[in-house]
Image (cartoon, rainbow, N blue to C red):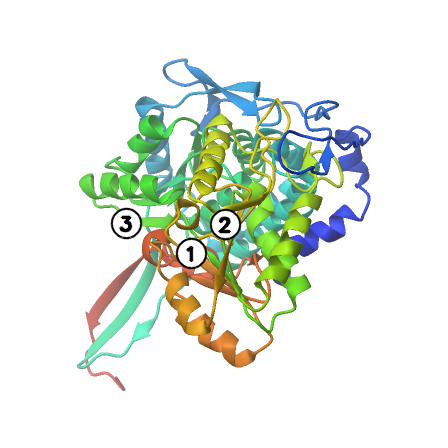
Amino acid sequence: MAARRISWLLSRSLSSSHSSGAASLLHSLGRNSGGWRNINRFSTAAVVEDLITPQVPIRYTQHLINGQFVDAASGKTFPTYDPRTGEVIANVAEGDVEDINRAVSAARKAFDEGPWPKMTAYERSRILLRFADLVEKHSDELAALETWNNGKIYEQAAKAELPMFVRLFHYYAGWADKIHGMTVPADGDYHVQTLHEPIGVAGQIIPWNFPLLMFAWKVGPALACGNTIVLKTAEQTPLTALFVAKLFLEAGLPEGVLNIVSGYGPTAGAALASHMDVDKLAFTGSTDTGKIVLELAAKSNLKPVTLELGGKSPFIVCEDADVDKAVEVAHFALFFNQGQCCCAGSRTFVHERVYDEFLEKSKKRALRRVVGDPFKKGVEQGPQIDLEQFEKVLRYIRSGIESNATLECGGDRLGSKGFFVQPTVFSNVQDDMLIAQDEIFGPVQSILKFKDIDEVIERANRTRYGLAAGVFTKNVNTANTLMRALRAGTVWINCFDVFDAAIPFGGYKMSGIGREKGIYSLHNYLQVKAVVSPLKNPAWI
């Protein structure tokens, strides 16, 4: 699958009919427009009323430990919610230290004594491929469950994220039997070789904004390299990881190789990060939590840690840009996934010569954005994940107003139920405002003005983050200057959010450590061993 922009997938999917399988999960569509309290009127799609009830049974709510679904050792459960209403979908086993201990013990036994690391790489590859086929078979059900538990647009889950999930496992299945060491020339009569060995038990902690894709980014390379896993889901979105874990068992994954524990960060997450028998840790989430994870790993057994953390990505619109196209891509870069994206283009820098035109068109585009039930066709934006995130976004909006940024549109909740936020645009934003510095993780676009390239480079880099950046220009020299000057792990030129299994992803500075996806992700789950043996009377050296 060629690299593709998710917005392109969505634009195609929104114009096409549902498959028959998807149609069986969704009811008939309905839309209306409502006027809501604030300075502007938004296109809405029955925000609370007439919600579609997904016809998806909740099959798996227990931990998966050593090939079995089991209750928490304490017997405790916790609720997982529908962000559209705030109502409980299901109660899920609440993991704690004892559950992590059981899961790590199972993973350790599976690595030290089980068949997985000793299995041929080709057979591991076949299991990964069988798993991908099973996910594809159940993709409509998984997409509906992902939307129900997360609030993301159903079309996005079904037409973009599930196919990408399958592609990622095809990709890593292809790598499984191509991981090998080297023969190294050395001074003297010695034969030197390197072995690339699985690292052992990998602890993985995934976030709530892309539950299935983050599962694939973590689990795919770890299994391809021959490791075993203990994965903690985000407490907000545990359901799809448990579902696909069952599919892994159906695909023939040996017991204990993949263990899933649901629970909270301060309990289950901390126990996993500090566990003395975990050999490697991978975490995706906020920078503040990443610091805690790194500290726990260091204070325990100094396990290596991969971190994919927050961002405050600049999106730079140059004076020669096609303004109409730049407006649409900048809108997508920020508002995609309800703004809940670590690489969101959340600082929109626009050259002063095109600033007024860009601002006016961006405001109109935000006002046209359709907010409502994410199961309904044509809806572009669903709810924020939960009450905590919803209130955080609204606090940042108030901060923007209080710091004298100009509120062009939005700025309030939408409806009276659930966690819907109006698409919000601020102009006259200054670099020292919180909305220009902090990761909001919501549908809030901040538009800043700049005069020249040197200025925007300095301002774009004046942040603790360095995850991604976007550049919109027709001038190849300008593009080349910016792509090298911007201190970010990914720079998109005249596009944004182009993801592919082979493209590495990760950040500079406080946006993380290491890279995910592509060949670089395999390095996270391998040890390199040098083996040296003497040669007697070698024919050559």
Q: Earlier in the sequence, mark 3 or mark 2?
A: 2
Q: Which of pointers 3 and 1 lies earlier in the amino acid sequence?
A: 3
| Relative depth, front residue between 138 and 345 | 345
Relative image position of residue 291 (x, y in whole percent): 28, 43
Q: Is residue 100 visible?
A: no
- The 10 Å Cα crowd at callout 2, few under 14, some 14 to 19, many 20 or more, is many
Residue 9 percent location from the top left of the image = 69, 53
- Considering only order in the chain, which callout, 2 or 1, is on the residue closer to the N terminus? 2
Pointer 1 residue: 467
Look at the numbered disc 3 and give the secondary structure of its residue. loop
SS of the residue under disc 2? helix
Q: How far across and how far down the image is residue 513, in percent?
A: 33, 54
Q: Secondary structure at mark 1?
A: loop
Q: Position of residue 394 (x, y in %)?
A: 49, 34
Quarter of the image with the C terminus is bottom left
| Label 2 sits on residue | 124
Residue most toward the bottom? Answer: 540
Residue located at (45% from left, 45% from top): 404
Q: Are marks 1 and 2 in contact (CB under 8 Å)?
A: no
Of tags 3 and 2, the one toward the viewer is: 3
The answer to whether residue 497 is left or right of residue 112 is right
Q: CA distance from mark 3 to mark 2?
A: 24 Å
Residue occupying image coordinates x 69% and y 56%: 8
Q: Residue furthest top?
A: 75
- Which mark, residue 304? 3
Residue that extends furthest to the front in the rendered view of this protein: 404
Q: Which mark lies nearer to you, 3 or 1?
A: 1
Q: Residue at x 44, y 54 (%)?
A: 516
Give the CA distance from mark 3 to mark 1: 20 Å
Q: Residues within 10 Å of mark 3 (few under 14, many from 20)?
A: some
